[in-house]
Amino acid sequence: MKKLLSILCILLAAAMLGSTAATAATVDAEVYAVGANGERISGIPDPDQLDNGGEYSLMAGSKEVMTVGETQAVGRYYHVEFDIPDTTETVYLAGLTADNVEEIQDEIIQSYVSGQPFDMTNLGFIDAEKVSLNNTDSNLCWAASTADLLAYTGWAKQAGFQNEDEVMQLFADSYSNNGGYAYYGLAWFFNHASMTGNSGAVAAKVLDYPNSGGYLRNYAFDMVATEGWLHTGADLKMLLDHIKAGDGCGLGVIIKRKGTATGSGGHAITGWGMITDSRYADSNLNHYKAIFVTDSDSDVIEGRSREDAPNIMNLHPLYIDTDGSCCFDYDDQITAEMDDVVYLTPYSKNLPKETEFGAMRNKALYPDLTFSGLKLTDNALKDMVGKTMESGTTAVLKTYVANLSDKNFSRKITLDFEIKNQDQETVLSESYDLGSSLEARNNSALYTARLRNAPAGDYTVTCTVNKKHTDNEAFYYNNTRTMTFRLRDSCKLGDVNGDGTLDVQDVTMLQKYLVDYQVGWNEKAAERAAIRGDEPSIADATLIQGHLTEMETSYPIGEKTLYTMI
């Protein structure tokens, strides 16, 4: 049985709060696990020995103290999630192995509540290393983060590399020692492309261009890698969502001296988890209290091999700077401002890939048309509002066509939009002429399609560029993108009979339903009545009565909501 001390320390976290050091104590509570199917497991299980993806909850007496589960990343990596007792804060951390699941939680708690640095060494973290801070690879932090992403998501092994340090050595051997960007590093690793012009003036130069890279020639990197920002609460929510989905997350930060508004340079690290505070909405920057990262600068061993360097996970408290940016401190002089992120989807044999014989599979030598974002909104001036909107709303689809390659496209370009409903009927079809060329590494103008006054339903959008293959491209399968969205009718929560007004008749109808009198009842009535959960109950009738007598409640009774069904 694995040691229980770290689990018990979670229960002591409340006593640690406000102190500067954790003190030893004992807790008289049985510690055990509950499996994904509700089965009780004595002691602390080895996740690798469990079915159902290693999913289990750790219990101390009747209290759940932590959940453990396998991530979607390739290989047996795990995540942990638990509340810090007697606080409103929750820890989520991914990228763990079975060996470090329980060792790490004690360190997380003690570090966070005491305000001391969090450093856990040699526990199987993915952490590509530099070998020098002065030359050789001193500026290749972006390559180290790229290597972490490739190793974690399984793409490195598909290309014949065993771990992140092997991939990092490949980048060090293949690039000049200059700054760069993980997204471009993925373009080279997958598809030969430098994405910078490869002059060395803008970013690191590929030394044997265009003959190197291209280790995953059947996959266009842009079909598995995306870019994002880290400026707002919504951005950080997306980051945490991607971490929870098992994606690799390469973070870009702006380095600046404390008290200054301008940056003195950039740095790349890898994100693995966050501590959040439920007192704030997840769209609020204050919701995000700390971030877990690995950093190629934190463990450099000058003149020795990468494999000799320790693999260290760091926990950095986050704060909002005076300019509104989200930051953390490296020390009392240096601040890192959260700026951008590159997401990499885990490898799966089910992912789409190029199958056409005519595709050239080399973005360094051939152009490649694809899409830079496909977004759905209810207003052309707004960004995405979500994939469910009210019926009758004008659904606006926005996209740019991009040439994500090192070569210009020099033929006529067409863009086609098609929208079908759940019955596979075409409800919109539009075509655009984009001109006769698109330079390398550039986007077209913004193009939009509008679906007006559509009824409730499930819709599928298909966007296609260069449908007739007017020029040779590196890939053709990325010429088409699809997305789905839903339009739903609206109602008032608590308006059980659906007449648009909340009154005693709604209470009466719900009460009759609860004693099996179902005249006028249907699934939509059930949705309007289910205020507290999925199924209507007597508690919902009581809440509606309270609303009619102007009793305060946290439930949005009487407010507009959307049905989940058509």
Image (cartoon, helix red, strand yellow):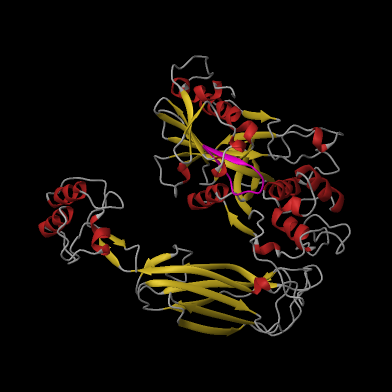
Q: Position of residue 308 (x, y in %)?
A: 81, 32
- Depth check, front residue: 410 or 166: 166
Quadrant for residue 216, please give it: bottom right
Q: Residue at x 30, y 50 (%)?
A: 533
The answer to if 69 sits in the magenta stretch is: yes
- In the rendered structure, the answer to whether residue 558 lies left or right of residue 364 reads left
Any part of residue 332 in sight: no
The answer to if 184 sits in the magenta stretch is: no
- Depth check, front residue: 111 or 331: 111
- In the rendered structure, the answer to whether residue 160 lies left or right of residue 505 reads right
- In the rendered structure, the answer to whether residue 512 lies left or right of residue 247 reads left
- Depth check, front residue: 267 or 558: 558
Q: Residue at x 43, y 28 (%)?
A: 85
The residue range painted magenta reads 68-81
Q: Position of residue 182 (x, y in %)?
A: 71, 53
Q: Position of residue 435 (x, y in %)?
A: 66, 84
Q: Residue at x 59, y 36 (%)?
A: 47
Quadrant where the C terminus is found in the figure: bottom left
Quadrant for residue 89, please give it: top left
Q: Residue at x 25, y 58 (%)?
A: 493
Instruction: Give the vertical position of 521 relative to 43 (above or below).
Output: below
Q: Position of residue 432 (x, y in %)?
A: 58, 84
- In the rendered structure, the answer to whether residue 269 lies left or right of residue 513 reads right
Any part of residue 65 in sight: yes
Quadrant where the N terminus is found in the figure: top right
